Image (cartoon, rainbow, N blue to C red):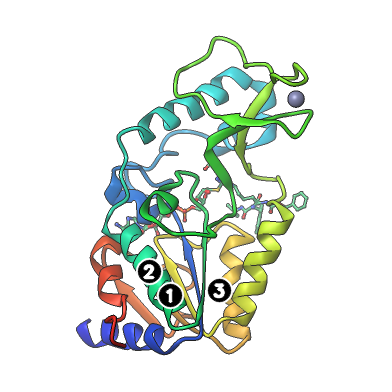
């Protein structure tokens, strides 16, 4: 595999525009459970009961407290070497005049803690709650509630500031991600099972625009056969090897 890692690093070192898409796999080594893997968050839970507007409207408090619990777990979560490597990669690419866009499906905010900037949070964020009736946003509490907290501005109940199944992604964020993918010369997919759309479609935008694609994952996914350089292993171990030397 060493040769393939070298190949991926050379692609990134020569790239003018790099786009990286991450999924829950990059936070696994920070102790945050993935969704679909063994021991995944959604093991035994019905996604439609929790990560959908219908599920929330049926059991608002139960869903709200699923998110306050996940917010509480963030308190002891730190970025791992994979998050840090992507922040270094961004600095390297930008220092030589290139552009670097990191789009994530994760809602844990660990990329920003690791130093990545301009992160496109495709599925929202666990760190804020938003009002259901007005633009007010505020920090997501890490303690369970016994009633949905009211918006301080208009009194309507708050909700987690995430994108549920059946909900549209924030338009500006999706446009920025799709634009960047269709203009990049290297696209790197990290730690995602590549089954949730439209995020999973970004690699196709990149490939159809002639980009080279790299995938970092523990196991094959539906895009593994599409990418130029599939790298099997842990994001925390592989990503630091993809950061070009400062001299490069
Ligand atoms: C929309 C936020 C339209 C909440 C999430 C049929 C066909 C195609 C599409 C659809 C369809 N039916 C429905 C749809 C649309 C649907 C969809 O794609 N469904 C799929 C399941 C078929 N998509 C939507 O509903 C989206 N919205 O389409 O809107 C629309 C338009 C206009 C107006 C109205 C509506 C919204 C999707 C967003 C849903 N929200 N999360 C929350 O997090 O609680 S999705 C959820 O899945 C997370 O965001 C997560 O990030 C995302 C993807 O999962 P992954 O991140 O990939 O995680 P997973 O566990 O699956 O995989 C982890 C991977 O990491 C594995 O491959 C593993 O091997 C690897 N790994 C593990 N450890 C490591 C590692 N790799 C490297 N190193 C390691 N150490
Ligand atoms: Zn309000």
Q: Is residue 81 left or right of residue 51?
A: left
Q: Which residue is depicted at the point 31% across and 76% down?
A: 242
Residue 237 image offset from top left, x and y in percent: 23, 65
Indicate the secondary structure of the residue bearing disc 3.
Answer: helix
Which residue is label 1 attached to?
A: 224
Image quadrant holding the N terminus, namely bottom left
Is tag 2's residue or tag 3's residue first in the polypeptide sequence? 3
Q: Is residue 120 above or below residue 129?
A: below
- The residue positioned 63% from the left and 21% from the top of the image is 60
Kindly identify which residue carries mark 2: 220
The foreground one among 187 and 98 is 98
* Disc 1 secondary structure class: loop
Q: Quadrant of residue 53?
A: top right
Mark 3: few, some, or many residues within 10 Å (few <14, many ≥20)?
many
Q: Which residue lies furthest to the top in this view?
A: 146
Task: Describe residue 142's horizontal placement relative to residue 50 as left or right.
Answer: left
Q: What count of labels does the image hold?
A: 3
Where residue 92 is drawn, which disc sits there?
none
Q: Which of marks 2 and 3 is in front?
A: 3
Q: Which residue is identified by label 3?
A: 203
Q: How far apart are marks 1 and 2 (CA)?
A: 6 Å
- Using the image, determine if residue 211 lies above or below residue 152: below
Quarter of the image that includes the C terminus? bottom left
């Amino acid at each position: 595999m060493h040769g393939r890692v070298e190949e991926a690093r050379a692609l990134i070192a020569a790239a003018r525009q790099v786009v990286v898409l991450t999924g829950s796999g990059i936070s696994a080594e920070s102790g945050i459970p993935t969704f679909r893997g063994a021991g995944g968050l959604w093991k035994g839970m019905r996604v439609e009961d929790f990560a959908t507007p219908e599920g929330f409207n049926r059991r608002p408090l139960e869903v709200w407290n699923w998110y306050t619990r996940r917010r509480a777990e963030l308190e002891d979560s730190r970025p791992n070497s994979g998050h840090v490597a992507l922040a270094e990669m961004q600095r390297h690419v930008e220092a030589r005049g290139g552009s670097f866009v990191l789009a994530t499906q994760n809602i844990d905010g660990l990329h920003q803690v690791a130093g990545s900037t301009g992160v496109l949070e495709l599925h929202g964020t666990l760190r804020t709650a938003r009002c259901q009736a007005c633009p007010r946003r505020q920090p997501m509490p890490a303690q369970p509630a016994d009633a949905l907290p009211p918006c301080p501005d208009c009194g309507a109940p708050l909700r987690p500031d995430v994108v549920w199944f059946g909900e549209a992604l924030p338009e500006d964020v999706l446009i920025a991600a799709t634009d960047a993918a269709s203009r990049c010369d290297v696209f790197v997919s990290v730690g995602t099972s590549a089954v949730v759309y439209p995020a999973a479609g970004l690699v196709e935008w990149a490939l159809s625009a002639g980009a080279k694609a790299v995938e970092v994952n523990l196991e094959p996914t539906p895009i593994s056969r599409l990418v130029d350089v599939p790298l099997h292993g842990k994001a925390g171990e592989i990503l630091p090897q993809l950061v070009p030397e400062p001299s490069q």
